[in-house]
Image (spheres, rainbow, N blue to C red):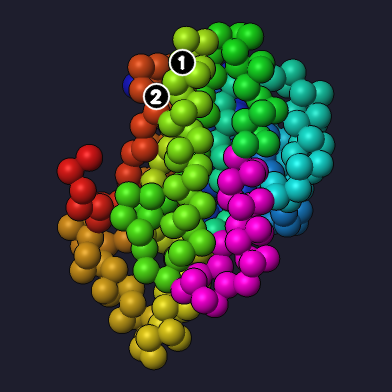
Amino acid sequence: MDLGIRGKVALVAASSRGLGRAVAEELATEGVNLVLCARHKDVLDETAASIRKATGVTVIAVATDVSDPEAIDRLWSVAQNEFGRVDILVTNAGGPPAGPFESHAPSAWSNALRLNFESVVNLTRAVLPGMKERGWGRIINITSIAVKQPVDNLILSNSVRAAVTGFARTLANEVATYGVTVNCVMPGYTLTDRIADLAESNAKQRHTSVEAITGAWESQIPMGRLGTPREFAAMVTFLASERASYTTGASIPVDGGWIRALV
């Protein structure tokens, strides 16, 4: 299937590893040029070099802390100077710390809002005017299954990801007539460093083993296993495509059936 996005430009946040890297790799296989960002320059540069070598697309890597609005301004300046536009935005950031409500100081809530909500708003603010002017754009937010069904021990993520979903759903209606779609993709339990850290945190809290925690998650998933980053990236790439032109305002799970809700 030709997804119709060869030659487009995508900005993928938090793309040095995990889900963000998988998304960048999948987009590159469709001929999409990339602006990658993450906090750690060495890991980011290695990812960019690997994607360039494997696919031949143009890849720009910019070390960026997306919780810093000024850093996002610098990232956007680099993207404009190199490509003149961004057609596809994939928002993403590392999850906030695990733990119950009373374990988090007020600063943890402020940090989570800056990292996981305000970064989405600031990245969107940068790319949206150009998308509207050109009459084409894709904004895809990586959220979480916690939006539909809260995950134990993740009160910060459960709360802030829901705010992103409200923002995205409202924005989708505002920009639909400009040919810009806005969607969210909700990863379930997927084989990433984030999930490994969460398993360790839960194991300590419950005085059990990481294997027991992982096994319990797998028992809740109808497919009986954790997902892979590439499986997740395939959904994001489809939503970024020309073929997904009539899908907007959606939150789509990639979770092996974990969410039990009807809608």
Q: How many marks?
A: 2
Q: Residue furthest bottom?
A: 207
Q: Which residues are magenta?
A: 96-120
Q: Which residue is labeled 2 in the image?
A: 248
Q: Is residue 100 magenta?
A: yes
Q: For numbered disc 2, what is the local secondary structure?
A: loop
- Mark 2 in CB contact with mark 1 (< 8 angstroms): yes
Residue lying at 66% horizontally and 16% vertically, measured from the top left: 130
Which mark is first along the chain, 1 or 2? 1
Say if 107 sits above or below 20 in the image: below
Q: Is residue 211 left or right of residue 102?
A: left
Q: Is residue 114 magenta?
A: yes
Residue 94, horizontal then vertical, whole percent: 58, 56
Q: For numbered disc 1, what is the local secondary structure?
A: helix
Q: Quadrant of residue 34?
A: top right
- The amino acid at mark 2 is Thr
- The amino acid at mark 1 is Ala
